Image (tube, helix red, strand yellow):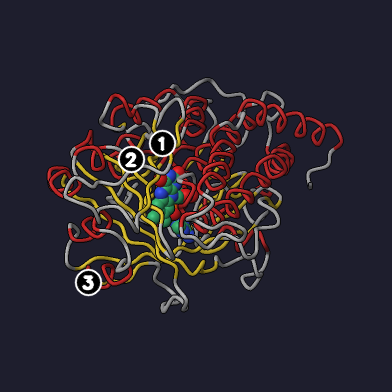
Amino acid sequence: MATQNQTKKSFEIAVIGGGIAGATLAVALIKHGIPCQIYEQGHGFSEIGAGVAFSPNALRAMDICDASLRAAFDKVGTHNQWPQKHDVYFDVLDGMAAGHGDENDKGTPLFTLTNDQGMDAVHRAHFMDEVSQVIPKDRCHFRKHLDRIEETGGQNGRVKMFFHDGSTAEADAVVGCDGIKSRTRQIVLGDDHHPSAPPSYTHVYGYRGVIPMEQAVAALGEERAQNSCLWLGKGAHILSYPVDGGKTFNMFGAVVDKGDWPSQTELTLPTTREEALRDYADFGPMVKKQFELVGENIDKWALFDTGDHPVPQFNKGRIVLCGDAAHATTPHHGAGAGFCVEDSAVLSEMLADERVRSPEDLAACFAAFDAVRRPRGHWLVQSSRRMCELYQDRAEGVDQKKDVEKIRKEMEERFQKVWSYDLNAAIQEGKEDMHKRLQSGASSS
Ligand SMILES: Cc1cc2nc3c(=O)[nH]c(=O)nc-3n(C[C@H](O)[C@H](O)[C@H](O)COP(=O)(O)OP(=O)(O)OC[C@H]3O[C@@H](n4cnc5c(N)ncnc54)[C@H](O)[C@@H]3O)c2cc1C
């Protein structure tokens, strides 16, 4: 359990949502002895049964939040299986060509992206199981769907939350970690019909698959199955890495969609392996084989983000947004969850600052958090879109066949911007800005 330090704080934080953003924030607040309660609409902390990769910036953020997060990650995290691939983030291959040769043709990398850590991934549900054990049960309130907030509706001007089951709760501030369809985002924007309130369809959908490793090895060979690969293509791409200590092959394919997403309410819809194979008809055998391994009936995932109308402000008074609620991104940087943990690290350190003591200090803290985190969140959303275009031969000014070196350089630069983020500098910047705001009595940005 996270250490509960003595607190000098005379305020309590309500965290809405128990996904990666809400859970990691709660762990960090508990470490600092900051009173907090979590309200989650589901029956518990749950995640889907697919993989999620955490890059070096995310692991550094876990270290800042609390050692227990890093321990959880280390317990269930999986690296590339081959020692010589330890620093490989992705072997990048031509997905249209690979496998057309003889049976030994497993594809030759066009180039390899590396970092000190290589590919580190977890099975989402296993990671959340570990993290949730760190959060005391009496802090967790499940089956609580936030409907609305009265900013000063509680006793002594506290924030009052209204839940779908008719119950209410009060806190001195609310952190909205309620994901891509965030209700808190609508509340911060002040209008359900604000253009930034709903996420928008990026006209790309995805397929996810988790396959027993021995089947993947039989189909793809050890090198490609047991180590991370990114297969480029035209109008689609696919990537994979091992999870579950190497027992499971986790893959994700994304396809450009000329049409609109057919559902107003559902982000996933059932489809078939045959449809996926049709989408990848022009790809080489090494890619097609991956779809032949998934079940006959699979789901198609709509990729929405906040890129068309970036959220103009993450804060409003004593309410602030974190994670996908603030900056919902497509998965092409493999960084949305990592940015959730970054948010948790920065916000918790700012709240722990000794100059933040009473409820009156919280608006300045949130305004400074918005100022330091919003540019990076917005950048990720746009850069992730660009990465998808690079992977799928749709990037303006780049021809996938002729410009391999140009693609490598741009991908490398964009990934480096994710990986090399100086979290301590960001925390310092946020605190300095916050101090100025506290001194001047100004809270808005
Ligand atoms: C296909 C795919 C692959 C990805 N791969 C990666 C990857 O490899 N690496 C990476 O870093 N990121 C990845 N991401 C992004 C990452 O999954 C998200 O950025 C991250 O999970 C968002 O976490 P969150 O806590 O902000 O939101 P969520 O996980 O959506 O959690 C929000 C929580 O809030 C609850 N909630 C919602 N509304 C309410 C309400 N009104 N009241 C109470 N509770 C509420 C929900 O039940 C949920 O538990 C991927 C995303 C996709 C779609």
Q: Residues within 10 Å of mark 2 (few under 14, many from 20)?
A: many
Label 1 sits on residue? 89
The image shows a total of numbered marks equal to 3
Label 3 crowd (10 A; few <14 / some 14-19 / many >=20): some
Q: Which residue is tagged 2?
A: 228
> Does the CB distance between marks 1 and 3 fall below 8 Å?
no
Q: Is residue 293 left or right of residue 71?
A: left
Question: Which sits earlier in the primary sequence, circle 1 or circle 3?
Answer: 1
Q: Is residue 40 visible?
A: no
Amino acid at the residue labelled 1 = Tyr
Q: Are marks 3 and 2 in contact (CB under 8 Å)?
A: no
Is residue 45 shown to the viewer in this render?
yes
Residue under pointer 3: 274
> Given contact means CB atoms under 8 Å apart, are the residues at marks 1 and 2 in contact?
yes
- At a point 51% along the width and 30% down the height, the residue shown is 61
Q: Residues within 10 Å of mark 1 (few under 14, many from 20)?
A: many
Residue drawn at x 51%, y 64% as measured from the top left: 147
Which quarter of the rendering shows the N terminus?
top left
